[in-house]
Image (cartoon, grey):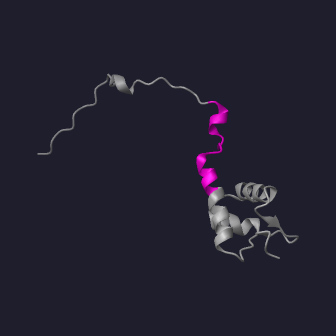
């Protein structure tokens, strides 16, 4: 004969009695995190390691597994600081390369 399951008590445990709090809308937005600094370092490393590397934003986004907007922001920041240059055809490369 199978064992009978115990009936759940009608009085829930006190530790489950948690007050509901709504989160502010800004909590749902993706915030810049320390991980984004790691992504920037990884992007730099790839350009240094692969000397002939000259991807478009879309190619770089796929390679680095990040969305296009974040990739565009990172690459533009690297151009602004002089680490990369953007060619007329929309590719990014190290400034020492023609």
- In the current view of this chain or complex, which residue is farthest to the left? 1
The x and y percentages for residue 3 are 15, 42
Judge by depth and name the residue closer to the eye, 8 or 80.
80
User: At 88% across and 70% down in the image, what residue appears?
Assistant: 88
Q: Is residue 9 above or below residue 57?
A: above
Left or right: where 13 falls relative to 71: left
The x and y percentages for residue 80 are 81, 56
Q: Is residue 82 above or below residue 49?
A: above
The x and y percentages for residue 33 are 61, 45
Magenta residues: mostly which secondary structure?
helix
Q: Quadrant of residue 13?
A: top left
The x and y percentages for residue 78 are 75, 58
Judge by depth and name the residue closer to the eye, 53 or 27.
53
- The stretch in magenta equals 24-39
Quarter holding the N terminus? Answer: top left
Left or right: where 40 falls relative to 96: left
Judge by depth and name the residue closer to the eye, 87 or 67.
87
Judge by depth and name the residue closer to the eye, 18 or 60.
60
User: At 75% across and 54% down in the image, what residue appears?
Assistant: 73
- In the current view of this chain or complex, which residue is farthest to the front? 96
Q: Is residue 91 magenta?
A: no
User: At 21% across and 38% down in the image, what residue appears?
Assistant: 5
């Amino acid at each position: 004969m199978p064992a009978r399951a115990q009936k759940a008590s009608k009085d829930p445990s006190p530790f489950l009695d948690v007050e509901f709090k709504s989160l502010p809308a800004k909590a749902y937005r993706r915030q810049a995190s320390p991980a984004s600094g790691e992504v920037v370092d990884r992007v730099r490393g790839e350009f240094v390691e692969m000397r002939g590397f000259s991807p478009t934003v879309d190619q770089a986004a796929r390679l680095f597994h990040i969305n296009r907007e974040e990739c565009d922001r990172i690459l533009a920041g690297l151009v602004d600081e002089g680490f990369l240059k953007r060619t007329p055809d929309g590719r990014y490369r190290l400034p020492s390369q023609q």
